[in-house]
Image: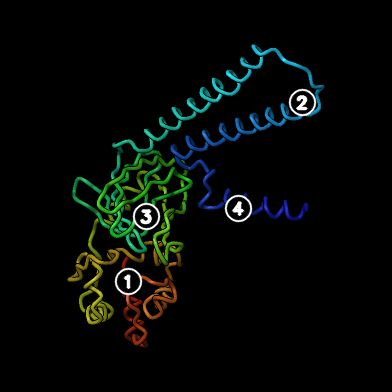
């Protein structure tokens, strides 16, 4: 029995560690939700103790008559007024937190479109939109406003360490505010079942120093640096990859799949599930559906040898 209890505790506590740790307090909004959680948990513990204590007393105490007035007072105060005050207070507190995390302002505005099964990310800047995919970078201490929508089915945007989750609904725009308070690479994921590869729909949420973020965003806005006549770009064009993917600075302007302009600067491949390495890139091209089932991108098993090496080398140069 003790071993079973210990195993259950380990499973429960596994959600309280790592980059998806919802108790990390890495964001202002996450701290507000965490405080509310601990207050509710403590209150629930106190109420449980009182109820069990009252039940134990009633079971062991000698049965004797009580005056009707005292019984009515106990029922009204303990069964009506106290629960209304407690639940009402928690409801108001929760609504205030909801108001803060759905505020419609921020120093930075980021549009995120949930697709099957990846994330289109667009930073709004005075110079124009900056498009990337499957990775979100944020400046430390600055409030970011996320404008969320979905392309096909309902998704849910969630970075547990930074704040609450928000549904992404086709044809509708929802908003979520996050204010990072800790540097690091925090895991994000889709929290609404959306089909076959739902569990593999993740992303990195990287919190950076403000100056580092400004330099990164400036670099992200630039076109790709591609050598004229690059063999890998030739293969990219010949295989028709530009019909789905865009690489700014080239003729590839596809809007179906993720923007690849600075692909190799991201830490992960395949919407946050594989390390960005040449080996994984090659497998992603030739064994696509083995690495991520049911996605729309076709596999290219016939692309081998020098042509595959050239294409992988080209994609890994897009930093």
Q: Where 5 sits versus 178, above or below?
A: below
Q: Is residue 59 left or right of residue 110?
A: right
Regarding mark 4 in the picture, which secondary structure is present there? helix
- The one nearer the camera, 170 or 180, is 170
Q: Residue 296 got which mark?
A: 1
Residue 160, x across and y down, in percent: 47, 47
**Crowdedness of circle 2 by 10 Å Cα count: few (<14), some, many (20+)?**
few
Q: Which mark is nearer the camera, 3 or 2?
A: 2
Disc 4 target residue? 14
Q: Earlier in the sequence, mark 4 or mark 3?
A: 4
- In three-dimensional space, the C-alpha distance between marks 4 and 3, rounded to whole angstroms, equals 24 Å
Q: Residue at x 67, y 50 (%)?
A: 9
Q: Earlier in the sequence, mark 3 or mark 2?
A: 2
- In three-dimensional space, the C-alpha distance between marks 4 and 1, rounded to whole angstroms, equals 33 Å
Q: Earlier in the sequence, mark 4 or mark 2?
A: 4
- In three-dimensional space, the C-alpha distance between marks 3 and 2, rounded to whole angstroms, equals 50 Å
Regarding mark 1 in the picture, which secondary structure is present there? loop
Regarding mark 2 in the picture, which secondary structure is present there? helix
- The one nearer the camera, 309 or 109, is 109
Residue 285, x across and y down, in percent: 36, 77
Q: Is residue 232 left or right of residue 37?
A: left
- In three-dimensional space, the C-alpha distance between marks 4 and 2, rounded to whole angstroms, equals 38 Å
Q: Earlier in the sequence, mark 1 or mark 3?
A: 3
Q: Which mark is nearer the camera, 4 or 3?
A: 3
- In three-dimensional space, the C-alpha distance between marks 1 and 2, rounded to whole angstroms, equals 64 Å
Q: Where 141 sits versus 116, above or below?
A: above
Disc 2 target residue? 57
Answer yes or no: do the residues labelled 4 and 2 have beta carbons within 8 Å? no
Q: Which mark is nearer the camera, 1 or 2?
A: 2
């Amino acid at each position: 029995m003790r071993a079973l209890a210990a195993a259950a505790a380990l499973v429960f506590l596994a959600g309280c560690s790592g980059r998806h740790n919802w108790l990390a307090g890495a964001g202002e909004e996450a701290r507000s939700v965490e405080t509310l959680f601990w207050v509710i948990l403590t209150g629930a513990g106190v109420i449980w103790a009182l109820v069990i204590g009252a039940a134990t007393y009633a079971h062991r105490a000698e049965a004797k008559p009580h005056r009707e007035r005292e019984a009515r007072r106990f029922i009204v105060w303990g069964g009506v007024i106290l629960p209304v005050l407690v639940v009402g207070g928690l409801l108001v507190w929760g609504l205030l937190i909801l108001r803060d995390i759905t505020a419609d302002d921020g120093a930075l505005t980021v549009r995120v479109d949930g697709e099957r099964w990846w994330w289109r990310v667009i930073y709004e800047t005075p110079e124009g939109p900056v498009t990337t995919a499957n990775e979100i970078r944020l400046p430390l201490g600055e409030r970011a406003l996320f404008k969320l929508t979905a392309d096909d089915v309902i998704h849910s945007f969630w970075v547990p360490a930074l704040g609450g989750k928000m549904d992404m609904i086709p044809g509708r725009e929802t908003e979520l505010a996050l204010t990072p308070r800790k540097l690091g690479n925090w895991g994000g994921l889709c929290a609404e079942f959306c089909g076959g590869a739902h569990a593999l729909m993740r992303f990195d949420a990287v919190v950076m120093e403000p100056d580092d973020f400004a330099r990164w965003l400036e670099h992200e806005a630039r076109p790709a640096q591609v050598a004229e006549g690059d063999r890998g770009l030739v293969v990219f064009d010949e295989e028709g990859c530009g019909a789905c993917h865009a690489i700014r600075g080239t003729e590839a302007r596809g809007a179906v799949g993720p923007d690849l302009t600075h692909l190799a600067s991201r830490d992960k491949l395949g919407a946050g599930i594989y390390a960005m390495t040449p080996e994984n890139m090659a497998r992603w091209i030739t064994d696509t559906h083995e690495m991520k089932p049911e996605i729309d991108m076709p596999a290219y098993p016939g692309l081998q040898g020098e042509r595959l090496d050239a294409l992988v080398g080209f994609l890994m140069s897009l930093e």
